[in-house]
Amino acid sequence: MNETPADVVMATAWYPPYDLGGTEIYLEGLVQELSLKGLKCAVLVPRVPGAPDRYEHRGATVWTYPVELPKARQSGGATRRHGQFDRFEALLRLNPHAIYHQHSWTTGCGLDHLRAARAQGLRTVLTFHVAGTVCLRGTLLHFGEVPCDGMVEEIRCGACWAESRGAPRAAAWAIGRLPRALAARTLQGRTRLATALSARALAIGKGQELNEAFELSDRLVAVCQWLADTLTRNGAPSDKLVLSHHGLAASYLAEAVQAAARKRSESINLRLVYLGRWDRAKGIHVAVAALRRLPLETPVELSIHAIGAAENDGYEAEVRALAAGDPRVRFLPSLPHRDIAEALAAHDVLLVPSLWLETGPLVVLEAQAAGLYVLGSDLGGIAELVAGTEGGELLSPGSVRDWAEAIGRLAARKSQYPLPKFQGPLRSHADVADDMINLYRSLPPALARESRLVKIDP
């Protein structure tokens, strides 16, 4: 382990090449760009099956540490101390003057890891990437139906959580109002009933976690405006909170431009594409139902490139059954990231029918770079990326009628003239890295350590 200590330690629950989602692509690009700008980065990540103790990935050293889950349930929700935690602490000690920048909120990379970094005297930054960091349910949809303001309130959040675990709505509200002491005692239970009854205690714990995270972090980063607003409502100090939107890799931007410039195969059909996970909250069924609502002679086709979700509750089979017998819907293999630019450029419209609040999604930026029109749900990050642009349209989440009408309009429009394209500038990973360098420079001097950061040119 004799190597130069890092300037920045990135802590995350997942990292390439073993995991590759939107957050992982973001973080991989950030690490690369920071390295190009003179900062040495190390990545700490829980070890997954098949991963070594240490590996190199695109110029960065990645250290892994074991995570042994406690046998008994503990208070504090998802951020509970795991077995062999000392291995994580030992990795922190290899970088005594680093900035600690955490990107996840899980058992393997959560509140206890942030505490450990602070205890070792490191300056700390916490980036919020997903709604689940502030929402027990994970979607920021009140009772799974309408957007929530994200304010953690023990009775309301407890009721919402209990309902998500199977309690009828009326019973869920009663559970949310259980006395605090009774709700807390049920935390040690292992049954489904005990889980539901502990809802109020879990909501209290979520609020306490957020407050402690705000206290332990020198800076808090939100990747979209609605998430920044949510953190503010929950008490995030304004002098700590920084908004830094997603960006794209320079290599992808170049590939997308080249792919969009190539001559596409002539087709009278409006070519729709979905890229994402098999997850009910992603609303794939809405898109399929909307297309099925249109007459068969409508010149339209839909390509679905979906990857498996962590909890596939039969949703994929449900969507396939919904599309059965309609040749306009094609279920295709998931795509490696290197093929996304080419695949997008072969289509006209990206569909993002999400039913929950996205913090991106990255695929919207990728589609805009490739020259696609975007049909997206009028929610969260999707709305932030599409609103006010000529190259997209926002629709009512879950409204099959609205989605069908929009697809029908675009199919008719394509038969007459090309669809408009996104014209504005797109952020890059280099822009994100510049944001982070400015943030690192702003950290409180009382916790400052000797670092090569002072040598970075403006």
Image (cartoon, rainbow, N blue to C red):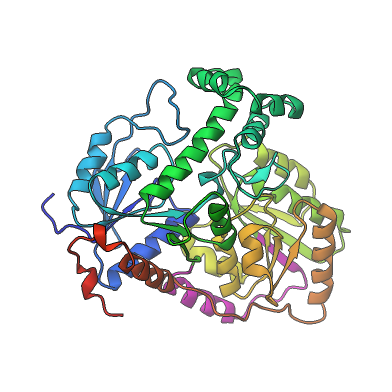
Is any part of residue 347 visible from this angle? no
Spot occupied by residue 249 in the image (x, y as percentages of width and height): 44, 70
The answer to whether residue 107 is magenta is no
Residue in the picture at 32% in, 65% down: 440
Quarter residue 174 falls in: top right
**Residue 84 versus residue 394 in the image, above or below:** above
Where's the C terminus, which quadrant? bottom left
Quarter residue 395 falls in: bottom right
Is any part of residue 302 visible from this angle? yes
Spot occupied by residue 341 in the image (x, y as percentages of width and height): 53, 69
Residue in the picture at 13% in, 56% down: 3
Name the side, left or right, on which 427 lies relative to 93.
right
Name the side, left or right, on which 142 lies relative to 368.
right
166 or 169: nearer the viewer:
169
Quarter residue 386 falls in: bottom right
**Residue 209 versus residue 256 in the image, above or below:** above
Name the side, left or right, on which 360 lies relative to 99.
right
Spot occupied by residue 73 in the image (x, y as percentages of width and height): 44, 23
Q: Give the residue furthest to the left.
A: 2
**Residue 119 versus residue 248 in the image, above or below:** above
**Residue 45 versus residue 81 in the image, above or below:** below
The answer to whether residue 259 is magenta is yes
What span is in magenta? 247-273
Spot occupied by residue 343 in the image (x, y as percentages of width and height): 58, 66
